[in-house]
Image (cartoon, helix red, strand yellow):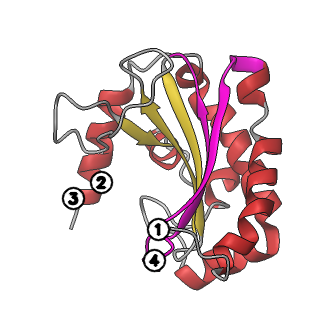
Amino acid sequence: MSDVSHPLTQRAPTFFALAQASFHFLKEQYGYQFERTTVADLQYAVDAHASVSYLGERVAVDVAWMYAEGYISVGFVELRTPWVRPAQADSLHVDRDMPLAISLDTLATMAGQAKDPDVLLHGRGLLGRRSLEACRRLVDTNMAGVIEGLARATRRYAADILAGDTSRFPEVVRFHAQEVSRP
């Protein structure tokens, strides 16, 4: 569903351009293909988001702006069939037959780098680092800086994944499941 009056629809072209410029290294260095830009779930205020997606031989990469929550994230999806994005992926390893999905935020947290400024720039994450209002304000005032920081952090913490090595996915998913289930 498309709603041209929704603020996300109006601002998405800027997000798309900034994300494609900052993540150009996926194509140049790792051979990824640009897959698509998407604006989705506008009818559900909490779920409205925009994303830029890339497809590699073994991994899909998504840069997503969760509009209502005011944060931008980077996610990685395991591909079971080369160059084919699965219909669904599992970030909690509930369904053992489903491909796994992990986030840059979880990778950095697991590496003990949750306070890396490039990761912190994106807003809220696994440990809820900023208020929703602080996230929105940061994205509104420095979207380019947020996205550039996430691109740097992606190179730093996910180089092996970008090169197609998904061997860490089960460990990262287990870590994520433990973190989100903490009281």
Q: Which residue is pictured at 77% across the width and 64% down the height?
A: 143
Residue pointed to by mark 1: 41
Q: Are marks 4 and 1 in contact (CB under 8 Å)?
A: yes
Residue pointed to by mark 4: 43
Asked whether 41 falls inside the magenta stretch, the response is yes
Q: Which residue is pictured at 24% across the width and 32% down the height?
A: 98
Looking at the rendered structure, the secondary structure element under dot 3 is helix
Residue pointed to by mark 2: 179
Q: Amino acid at mark 1?
A: Asp
For discs 3 and 1, the disc positioned in front in the rendered view: 1
Looking at the rendered structure, the secondary structure element under dot 4 is loop
For discs 4 and 3, the disc positioned in front in the rendered view: 4
Asked whether 73 falls inside the magenta stretch, the response is no
Q: Are marks 2 and 4 in contact (CB under 8 Å)?
A: no
Q: Residues within 10 Å of mark 4 (few under 14, many from 20)?
A: few
Precedes in sequence: disc 3 or disc 1: 1
Provide the residue span drawn in magenta.
29-57
What is the CA distance from the residue labelled 3 to the residue labelled 1? 27 Å
Looking at the rendered structure, the secondary structure element under dot 2 is helix
Q: Are marks 2 and 3 in contact (CB under 8 Å)?
A: yes
Q: Vertical placement of 118 versus 9: above or below?
A: above
Q: Which residue is pictured at 51% across the width and 73% down the height?
A: 42
What is the CA distance from the residue labelled 2 to the residue labelled 4? 30 Å
Q: Nearer the viewer, residue 32 or 116?
A: 32
Residue pointed to by mark 3: 181
